[in-house]
Amino acid sequence: MPSMRQNPPEVHVSEYSSCPETWLLGVRIVDLPSEAIVAQIDQAIQHRRKSIFQYVNIHALNLAQELPWFREFINQAALPYCDGYGVLLGAWLSGSRLRHRSTPPDWIHQLAELCARRGYSLFILGGQPGVAEKAGARLRRHHANLQIRGCQHGYFDKSPGSTENEHTLRTINAAHAQILIVGMGMPLQERWLSENWARLNCLIGLPVGALLDYLAGERRRCSPWMSQHGLEWLGRLISEPARLWRRYLIGIPLFLFRILRQRYLSS
């Protein structure tokens, strides 16, 4: 596994300093609803601000305690936003306040509609071979004027300086897309962005986790009822127990323990 660069991504945090935010376990979270996040992406493109929009869920907060580079990546992102009811609960238990939870699968079509209307273009990176193309085709089916400048799977040698990584960077830059959607899973997608962001000419970096698989029909999301009542984690655990049991059955209690310990030590 290649070593991780310690330099944070080159972003403009100060541009978003007026947005409401809180800190949880040493991680900065901006408190905005999904429509405001899409509006901030629009503003960043219009003002040519190179920005990463990073989702924060329980898994991210646990990783941030174990990986200093990852915590720095989130805190240096232009807009780290809450993705998960567990984070809302954690904020409440810690004495902080977060009101909004926004997850990319819920607002990707809002973003695609904005891009189709404004003429913004996308490059889709991630997933198994063929997944990015399927995801792009489904977005185009719903948004006829959407410009997708390129698609590539995430199964390439991501080592800095490798032939495959250099080819990927050249391909993305040659497409001249304003928005780069990266779906490689956490923290791999963030590590790749941190190592390569300064060399990419995209304006917006958008890590999205499993979004591409959902768009492509490779995975099914849980029911809207479960999602709206904070049980999406359970739906994912039921559908992929072998891969996700540790993240949820160990990760959720560990997160709550860290939150309560922090509250006790600060009281």
Image (cartoon, grey):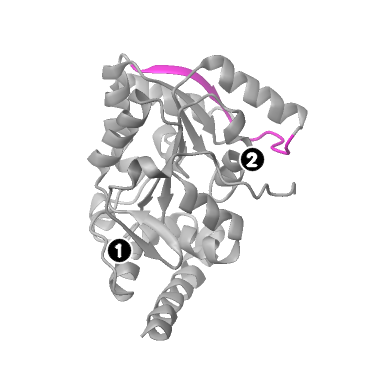
Dot 2 and dot 1 residues touching (CB under 8 Å): no
Residue in the image at 38% along x and 63% along y: 23
Instruction: Say how many tags the image has.
Output: 2
Name the side, left or right, on which 155 lies relative to 62.
right
The secondary structure making up most of the magenta span is loop
Which residue carries the number 2 mark?
A: 195
Estimate the x, y position of residue 124 in percent, counting from the top left: 49, 28
Residue 133 badge: none
* Disc 1 secondary structure class: helix
Name the side, left or right, on which 199 lies relative to 208.
right
**Label 2 sits on what residue type?**
Glu
Magenta stretch, residue numbers: 146-160
- Neighbor class of circle 1 (other Cα within 10 Å; few <14, some 14-19, many 20+) is many
Which label lies toward us, 2 or 1?
2
* Disc 2 secondary structure class: helix
Residue in the image at 72% along x and 35% along y: 157
Near-viewer residue (236 or 70): 70
Estimate the x, y position of residue 205 in percent, counting from the top left: 47, 35
Q: Is residue 165 above or below residue 53?
A: above
Residue 78 makes an appearance in the image: no
Which residue carries the number 1 mark?
A: 88
**Label 1 sits on what residue type?**
Leu
